[in-house]
Amino acid sequence: MSLKDNISMVKDELNAEEKFFENAVKTERFVKKYKTKLIGLVVIAVVVVGANAIYEYTKNSEAEASNSALMSLQKNADNQEALAVLKDKNPKLYDLYMLSVAIEKGDINKLKELKSSKALAVSDLASYQVASSEKKLNDLNSYTNNEDAIYRDLAAIESAVLLMQENKIDQAHRKLALVSSQSPVYAVAKSLMHYGVK
């Protein structure tokens, strides 16, 4: 290597070291300037990760406890301790369990209580069961008028049958016309329109 090449190489190395030190000084100034904010961000990140881990752990343990309580209730329906755990850990699952028990036993009073459940499917099913069991036209009609009702079409058919029994054929036709053509009970509604209500 020539002297010129050596000098050029040394200059390049000095420039690289100078840039490295310059970047180190800039980084040090940045860290000093924003030290508290950086520490705050790290602390916030640690707290968020820790809180999320605790939340997931709590959620999983409650799910396990409520599932265990439900299994115990399926083995022994009189287990009051398991019933209390289920009610405490998972109120919506508790309402669903109580709905199944009330339907099985035909407990209209319990079904009426469950109409106000926070679990939408439970409150809807309880409302339908009460209206269907009591065979009250007003209850069935109010259930049918709910756009989001799960058994809306079935309630319309039950209303139509009650109207047929009262010989109110035109009203029965209007009820049956409410049944959607996409509904699984559409064929039943059509059959009633054709054969049952003339």
Image (tube, grey):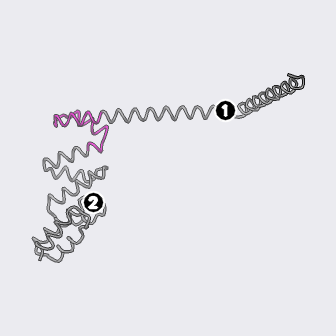
Observer-nearest of 179 and 132 = 179
Alpha carbons under labels 2 and 1: distance apart: 56 Å
Residue 69 part of the magenta-drawn span: yes
Instruction: Determine the residue positioned at 26% across, 64% down.
Output: 182
Query: Looking at the rendered structure, which numbered label has been put on residue 161?
Result: none
Q: Which residues are magenta?
A: 65-94
Say if mark 2 contacts mark 1, CB within 8 Å: no
State which mark lies toward you, 2 or 1.
2
Instruction: Determine the residue positioned at 18% across, 34% down.
Output: 79
Q: Give the SS element for disc 1.
A: helix
Disc 2 residue type (three-letter)? Ala
Left of 56 or right of it: where is 109?
Answer: left
Instruction: Kindly identify which residue carries mark 1.
Output: 36
Observer-nearest of 138 and 38 = 38
Left of 91 or right of it: where is 129?
Answer: left
On-image quarter of the C terminus: bottom left
Alpha-carbon neighbours of circle 2 within 10 Å: few (<14), some, or many (≥20)? Answer: some
Instruction: Kindly identify which residue carries mark 2.
Output: 149
- 29 in relation to 120, above or below: above
Disc 1 residue type (three-letter)? Thr
Which image quarter: residue 160?
Answer: bottom left
